[in-house]
Amino acid sequence: MQITEKGKMFNEIDKQKALAILRIFETGRAKARYDALAVLDDGAGISYGFFQFTHRSGALNAVVKKYLAAGGKIGRDALESRLRTLARTTKPAIERLSHDPEFRKVLIAAAASSEMREAQRAVAEKRYIAPAERVCRMNEFETPLSLAVVLDGLVHGSFGRIARLVKGSTEQELITDYLRRRDAWLRSSLRLRKTVYRTEFFLGEAAKGNWQLRLPVTVKGRKLTAEDLDDDREAAGFPPKSLPETSKTEPQIPATEIPADEPRPSILATAEAAFDQVDDVVTGIATRTERARSLWATVAGTLWQTLWAIVAFVAGIPREIWIITAVAAAILTALYLYRQYSLSKIRSSKEAK
């Protein structure tokens, strides 16, 4: 469907309000910090920069690649050596970098450079701001609250999955229905229900009729004021120097697909993700094989002792001899089982590291 200019363009203040709300959701701060870094507890891994670019979403990888392409020098070797892991969004890869102190330190240091700041602004514009504006423009959404809701949906994820179910005829009806459906979806997920403060805030402002997001507003217990935006103008300024190309097609709400809340992986990323899955399966098989060996060793030892006792009895071997032999076999079986147990503990400790 062709993009039309039915809806108005949002001004910089509208964008800054949306950005500040999302930053409070993610970090508790309204002011932009290019060096902000946290490891999220919802499985997204490292969250970095003024717009909280995460590993799992692929946004952190995009920022790092753009920084390196721009000639960024701070921590260049360390970042380049981790690009393959960063491109993978599997659980092992995310956990590996989340617990990599050198990687975190380098990201924080690189934030002082103009290359990293420009990379963050450009990626945020291309991946989130521009798509959110296009969705709003296609659906004739004109209020700052709608922009913030759409932007939050794209950033937090699964926007298209919920948006395709939305019903309504006006901006307020569509956005409110989307928020209610998203709120119910978040509450249904054990992992995501801790983030319902996002939908609670937006639903609260919609119920109050604050579609223009008049300040101050209280977001996640933190008051957002006009002064916060004034202090933040330079850090959160848009558009960046290098603007992304504008797409000519964009779906509407409700829609079958709405762009890029979960970017498609590259062929390499898909192959490496498959490798991770195979590796997990192989590891599980190996673990089960070791356990099976221990079980069969126990069974074989027991059968051997029983067979030896029967043969010794039939053959008339003195009791002392076959009892000593049986005890020796039992000791050897116990030693083997202890060895298997020790190896499994060593393997578990290595996997934990």
Image: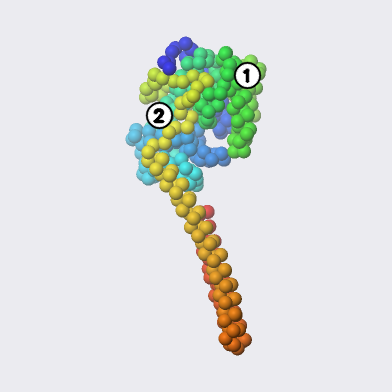
Q: Nearer the viewer, mark 2 or mark 1?
A: 1
> At numbered mark 2, what does the secondary structure look like: helix, strand or loop?
helix
- The structure residue drawn at horizontal position 40% and vertical position 29%, both measured from the top left corner, is 118
Residue nearest the viewer, comparing 107 with 147:
147
Q: Could one spot residue 17 in this view of the protein?
A: no
Horizontal relation, residue 38 to residue 114: left or right: right
List x then y, in percent, for residue 264.
43, 33
> At numbered mark 1, what does the secondary structure look like: helix, strand or loop?
helix
Horizontal relation, residue 4 to residue 44: left or right: left
Tell me which label, 2 or 1, sits earlier in the chain.
2
Label drawn at residue 228 = none
Residue nearest the viewer, comparing 262 with 256:
256
Q: Quadrant of residue 173?
A: top right
- The structure residue drawn at horizontal position 47% and vertical position 11%, both measured from the top left corner, is 6
List x then y, in percent, for residue 344.
53, 61
List x then y, in percent, for residue 290.
51, 62
Residue nearest the viewer, comparing 233 with 155:
155
Label drawn at residue 118 = 2
Which amino acid, by three-letter code, is at mark 2?
A: Glu
Residue nearest the viewer, comparing 234 with 160:
160
Which amino acid, by three-letter code, is at mark 1?
A: Ala
- The structure residue drawn at horizontal position 47% and vertical position 35%, both measured from the top left corner, is 57
- Considering every residue shown, the one lying at the far top of the view is 6
Q: Quadrant of residue 28?
A: top right
Q: Quadrant of the N terminus?
A: top left
Residue pointed to by mark 1: 206
Q: CA distance from mark 2 to mark 1?
A: 34 Å
- The structure residue drawn at horizontal position 51% and vertical position 40%, both measured from the top left corner, is 45
